[in-house]
Amino acid sequence: MHGEEEDIFDSVTWESASAPYDVDYTAKQAGPGFKQSTAGAEEPHGPHDPKWEGYLITIVKDPVKELPETKDAYVSYLVVAKTNLPIFSSQSPSARRRFQDFVFLRDHLVKDFPACVVPALPDKHRLEYITGDRFSPEFMERRRLELHRFLQRIARHPTLQRSTLLRAFLESTEWHVYMHQHIAHPPGPEPTPGLLDNLSDTLLNAFARVRKPDERFLEMRESVDKFEDGLVLSERLWNRIRGRTNDLMTDYHDFAVAVQGLGFLESGITDPLNHFSNTLLEFSALLRHKTQTSTDPFLVHLHSLLMYSHANRAVLKLRDQKQLDFEELSDYLSGVTLERDRLSAIISGHAGSSGLGLSAYLKDKVDAIRGADDDRSRVEKMRKLDVKIKELQDAVTTAHETSDAFSDETLREQKIFQHTKEAEMKEMLSNLADGEIEFYQSGMEEWDRIISLLQRIRVDV
């Protein structure tokens, strides 16, 4: 088994677009891709530059139908890896996992690392290019490829690649036990309801957008919008191309049948016409092969990249929510402080409610009707407001620190996402170009063979 895994990874081109970023072969800890950095041979200098502690290469392969002939049948996938990260107990971990295990991994990585862009899993039912049930070879291979891409994105991430959950996913022999333990005892402290959670939804949802947007994140959102618009347009155009290619494939097949029938009528040129008919059938088969091996994988990768961008957008939206929390808490603190100052002014006799606006005037009248306008009740209310102000000040400080920290992490995440996006775009478009080149080269060879044969036909006039 160990030798088989070595052969698998020997076939990986570490400098290719599918490998984790630039490779530093002179790193002190030897291994392909140890310094997973796009900065070349230099270490990151900026505070928001990603930093890798090692490499992690993953492969998902060998889908197998488990418990066949039963209602509980499912497909398992062999996940093998190669790494020099110290968190792993083996440099070549491997395990068999089913689709639901990948779902658990993804869902809990999102919970454990809310500021990280965790890639989306393939939709359980969105494989429109594949016919047959979920146990058909075509379906299992397409699912395997998408799970491979999902895990590859996680393995490229400098934070996610070092998570204890991923380590258990790749090497634990008691994965189900670990899943239950992870649910019962998640990493980090359990979130406790704070002052922010006790505020009404009306307060938190008073503003849909942040009032002091950061230009850096506005530019990021605009870039994401343009990128996703380009992906959606490309997907729509290539779906149209795919449909027209299928129509052309059918037309070439029908044309071949017609030429073959014509050959039976023209006895003098039956053989050349039969060869021409076979060429048409071969070209139709080439069109089908191009669709299956080039166009369909391109469309699947294109949609997967779109879903990955949606995950990135979700992180940007969550960052806005953190800033919105801070702004709303600050406004709430200002309102409570203003109310406390109003009561203090009334008690000291330095100001009346008439100088503090219509709402304060009406509030004083309501308190007077309720019999709560005496100084003693105002002093008690001021005491409660002082306590609330102290709580709010602590909450505002925490919210501000959280917002700033989340913003810093988001800036790092955008660089990581940009690196991954560029690598995958290069890989995706290179594969598409290779498929198109292979198709046209094979097509030219087919037509070159038949042209010389057709030119030898002699027709008596």
Image: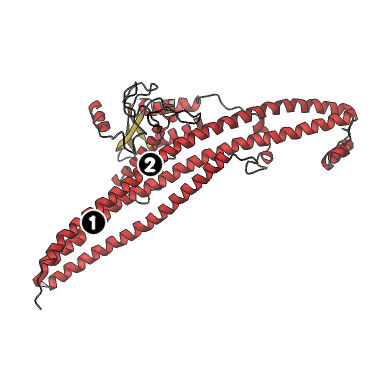
Q: Where in the figure is residue 172, as x and y percent of width and height?
A: 37, 25
The residue most toward the bottom is: 461
Count of numbered circles on the image:
2
* Amino acid type at image mark 1: Ala
Label disc, if present, on residue 424 of the rendered structure: 2
The residue lying toward the viewer, choosing from 386 and 147, is 386
Could one spot residue 133 in this view of the protein? Answer: no
Q: Where in the figure is residue 396, as x and y percent of width and height?
A: 67, 30
Mark 1 secondary-structure assignment: helix
Label disc, if present, on residue 32 of the rendered structure: none
386 in relation to 309, above or below: above
State how far apart marks 1 and 2 are (Cα): 29 Å
The residue lying toward the viewer, choosing from 134 and 138, is 138
Label disc, if present, on residue 285 of the rendered structure: 1
Q: Quarter-wise, where is residue 81 in the image? A: top left
Residue plotted at (44% across, 54% down): 233
* Amino acid type at image mark 2: Glu
